[in-house]
Image (spheres, grey):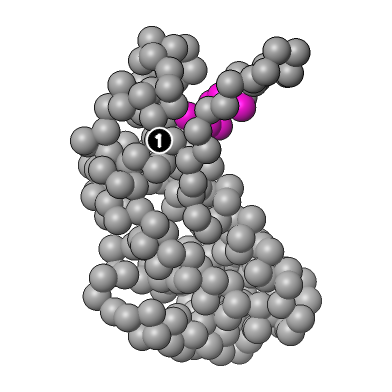
Amino acid sequence: MRYTFRPMKKNPRGRRRESSEETRERILEAARARFGRYGYRKTTMAEIAGDLGMSAANLYRYFSSKEEIMSGCMACHLEERAALLRGAVGACPGDWSSRFETFVVTLVQHTRALFQQMPTINELITELTATRADLACRKIRHERALIAELLEAGREAGEFHFDDLDRTAAAVQSALVKFSTPLFVPVCSDEEHELAARQTARLLVRALTCSDRVQGVSRER
């Protein structure tokens, strides 16, 4: 998934004017490009406005602060990742065990692509964790909901067996941190990262498809 900045075009006389929502989308796209290249701290509202060919005062009509822009960028990112993962799972012709592995592999591929497209992503994550814990928590909740959606579909199909959906989704999410966080990208190659993702997915599937083991752990707690 590549984030590209589309420069503002002047509308010829008589052509429809850009809506406020379209302007907001262009602002977020330009901000993500600048955050990715220069980092969050080094980016200013004036620079984002300059990239769009508008004044800083005009930019403030749409977003009250750089923090609000970052919140919007995060929301866009989560929506795009969710669409990508759902699309990959939906296109997988196999059983839910195969779809689970596809989910994990697609997740790590997206994470690595994001790191390549936004070299400052780890600095951005550190900044968010320190200053905007609400955004970091939003990302965690969104990711867990996607995992729960996948697990519930597998359970409804009779392939996955577990008692508590929320607790199982949380445990799976913890096991997949290495594949969903760009912080781990620099320490291994594409091949090593994807191999680890497949091995982890298969290990989790073995647990999810073994009803006695998963339910037994749940009841003991």
Residue 192 on the magenta segment: no
Closest to the observer, 143 or 119: 119
Q: Is residue 113 left or right of residue 133?
A: right
The quarter holding residue 74 reads top left
Name the dominant secondary structure of the magenta segment: helix
Question: Residue at (58%, 72%) from the top-left corner?
Answer: 103
Q: Which residue is mark 1?
A: 31
Residue found farthest to the front: 12
Q: Is residue 14 left or right of residue 177?
A: right
Q: Amino acid at mark 1?
A: Ala
Give the extent of the magenta segment.
Answer: 22-27
Could you tell me residue 67's position as x and y percent?
A: 35, 29
Could you tell me residue 144's position as x and y percent?
A: 52, 58
How many badges with numbers are in the image?
1
Could you tell me residue 16's position as x and y percent?
A: 73, 18
**Residue 31 in the image: above or below residue 14:** below
The quarter holding residue 68 reads top left
Neighbourhood count class around disc 1 (C-alpha, 10 Å): few under 14, some 14–19, many 20 upward: many
Question: Residue at (73%, 69%) from the top-left corner?
Answer: 90
Question: Residue at (57%, 84%) from the top-left corner?
Answer: 205
Could you tell me residue 102's position as x and y percent?
A: 60, 77
Residue 175 visible in the snapshot: yes
**Residue 51 in the image: above or below residue 175:** above
* Tag 1 secondary structure: helix
**Residue 104 in the image: above or below residue 121:** below
Residue 171 visible in the snapshot: no
Closest to the observer, 32 or 176: 32
Closest to the observer, 81 or 37: 37
Question: Residue at (76%, 81%) from the top-left corner?
Answer: 93
Q: Is residue 202 left or right of residue 71?
A: right
**Residue 214 in the image: above or below residue 19:** below
